[in-house]
Structure formats: C-alpha cells, structure tokens
Amino acid sequence: MDRPLRVAVVGAGPAGIYAAEALANQDDVPVLVDLLDRLPTPFGLVRHGIAPDHLKMRALAETLRHTLDHPGVRFVGDVEVGRDLSVADLRAHADAVVFTHGSSGARRLGIEGEDLPGSLAATDLVAWYTGHPDADRPRVEAALARARDVVLVGVGNVALDVARVLARSPAELEHTDMPQHVLDVLAAAPVERITLLGRRGPAQATFTTQELRELGHLEAAVALVDPDGLDEESEVRAVARNLAALRDWADHVPEAGKASVRLRFFARPVRVLGDDAVTGVVVERTAVDTADRLSGTRETDVLPADLVVAAIGYVGHDLPGLAVDGGTVPNAGGRVLRDGAISPGEYVAGWIKRGPTGVVGTNKHDARETVAALLEDAAGLPRVEGPDLVETLRSRGCHPVLLENWRTIDEAEHALGATKGRARTTIHDRDTLRAHAHGMQR
C-alpha cells in the first residue's frame, strides 16, 4: 500500500466520532479520516440532543474531543452533502465512506389538528433549547409565550427532558450553557400544568428511572401520577424501579405556587383542537389485552392545551444520493446495500444504521462493528486518485471549519459564558459561528 486508506465519515456526532476513533486507533491498516459535519461544530446529539441541565452527560464532549486531536483525524465542519458536495464527490475523494448522519426527523402523531400553531415536535423544542443553528425560533417562542397548559405525547426520556426543562425555575437553568434568549423565554413562559400521555401502562414506559426521579426534585414543580397501572408488578428490575418511583408520587397533590407535571397512562391523543391555534386535545382511554394488543375504548375527555409536543421518536431521512428504507439505510452489518447488493466502500453506523435506539454509548459498539467490516474489506477497496477533499471544497468557494477554527468557536463560547458567570454559553447563530471560526470576530 503506497498511502494510507482515505476514509470520509459523514457526521461528527457520537457515532461518527466513535467510528473515527476505531479507525485511528488500530494498527492493522494505515488510515486517514476526514470527519465531516454539516454544522460548524462537532459532537452532534451530545451538543444538540442531551438536555442542557444534564451537565455530566454533556461532559461526554470532553471525551469525544480527544479523537478530534488525533493526527490521523481531520474535522471538516460546515460541509453538507447535497449542498457542497455529492455522495459521488465523496467517493471520488475517499476510498471508503461511513455515513453516520443519524435520524433527525420526528415521527408524526398522524391526527387531526397536529399542524396547528402551538403543536410542535419534541425535536423542535430540543433544537431550540440546545441552540441548534436550524432551530425555528419564531415558531417555538410564539408557542411558549402562550403555553399555560402543555400536553406532551410520549413517556420516554426525551419527553421527560422536555417536561423537566419547561418546569424548571430560572435559577435551576442559570448555570447551563443554554443561549441567553432561551433562558429569557423559558423564564417568561407561563407554564402551569404539564401532562405526559402514555398509550400503554407505566410498566411499558421507556424512560429510565434516573430521568424519572429527576421530576420529583424540581424546585418549582410537583410531580403527579394517575393511579392506573401502578399496582402492576414486574420481575424486570428497571421496570420495578420505575413503578416504585411512580408509587412514591401516588399521594402527591398540586401545590399552590408550583407548576404540576402529571404522568397519565392508558391514554392517547385522537385530535388536537383549535381554529387558529391549539386550545385542547381530545384524549381516548386505551386498554391492553392479555396478548399485549392496544385498543381504544372510545371513552374520551378533553385536556386544555396551549402547547402540544409530540415526543414519540425519531426517523431517518434520505441523504441526497443515499436512500433510507423504513428510516434506516439498508445494510448488512454496517455494509451499505444498494438494490439488495453490498456497495463496496460504503458503510453506515449509528441511528441511520440501526434506528433511533440505545444510549450514546451504544454507538461505540455499533461503530466498532462497522469499522471491523471496513477493515476486513480494506485490501480489496480500489484506491481513488482524486485531490484532497478540503482543497476541492475551497476551490468551490466553501470555507470548511477545521479543528483550529472549531477551537476559536469553543473559546468564544467559554468567553461568552464567563460574562454571565457560566462555564460556557452556546452560540446558536450560524453566521456568528462562522465569523468566530474564520477570525472575523477575534
């Protein structure tokens, strides 16, 4: 081999960084990795998915950044496949491509009224409160300005994150890295009641006990739970812990001067009410039979709502030049399949490979499986003769954000945070990120 294997990894979130780490830290095949991301910043869902009040979890970025410092890895940010270059361009510049761009789309409720103003996907709110450059600020902030009653559909960790962020007091959020405009809007939001709806019982909820218990320790809100299903028993340890935590709240009642966060099970939304904006949700009671089949009972009631948030999962979308099927790219152990056959030199890892499941650490094993397949194939991969990827991007008028550029953004965020006595404050505006990256505000 006359030169190292060139690998382009599309997506600098945990899956992409773990793939780059696995490639860079092995000794069998010399490799140079270009780690691309469409944002000017790395870390993906660690930066723009994990709730800002989970400081220990967000600190995972400090571990991931070690891979960016590896001499065999080059971060290439603010580069979008389909805008700045095509999949064919990548194949002309890299011997292998690993797609790790995730599942950023939101699953829809599929009910009447869900497109009314005041109806959002959890992804909309999460992007907004984590300072994602693509967040729709006007839409989210208009919804929050009138959100006294909130209905959250879903009982997973994302739903709990959203509920917790909306229910926290300003003092509880002041130390986070949220953009200042997010803190200001949340402080002014008139939220009084938050109801989470789960179609099945508490034993089938997908949240973790740690996340659940956090709802019971909020300064400005009280956790409530409807009794349905709390008498269930489970031999599954995680489920038993969840049920025990919920039973601890069984005698809680609303408290004057505090918001409430209520978990309601065996309930599903069937219609969002309102003419010009959301005013309520029609909720149907559900039942689960002995074969674990869910059905509606036709017994309904109406919950007042100014804001409805769907937190029912993520879905992957096509990347220009790479189609998904059922939310993931067809693959065999990480090797991309096109028309049912393995496409040499193309691989996937992360959610776009397996679907939106697992925790951040799940991506490490997943990426290693894909990298093992790539290294197994390495000897048979044809070597491309194209020019350097960054040189090509610059020749097209692009201004990729490299590691030294990202470091200036990082420094700027720490400096901005220091003005408010925080460790850092996230810069949310893409143009400002670019200006810091390329030295125009230094």
Image (cartoon, grey):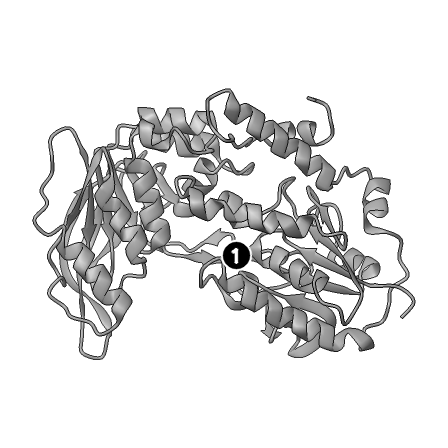
Q: Which residue is mark 1?
A: 103
Looking at the rendered structure, the kind of residue marked 1 is Ser
Q: Quadrant of the C terminus?
A: top right
Q: Tell me which corner region of the image, top left, top right, bottom left or bottom right, holds residue 199.
A: bottom left
At 14% across and 68% down in the image, what residue appears?
A: 232
Whether residue 171 is visible, yes or no, is: yes
Left/right of residue 175 with respect to residue 194 in the rendered view: right
Left/right of residue 140 with respect to residue 134 in the rendered view: left
Q: Position of residue 275 (x, y in %)?
A: 29, 36
Left/right of residue 90 with respect to residue 198 in the rendered view: right
Q: Position of residue 233 (x, y in %)?
A: 15, 70
At 56% across and 55% down in the image, what residue appears?
A: 14
Front residue (pair 186, 216): 216
Q: Position of residue 200 (x, y in %)?
A: 23, 63
Whether residue 401 is visible, yes or no, is: no
Front residue (pair 8, 292): 8
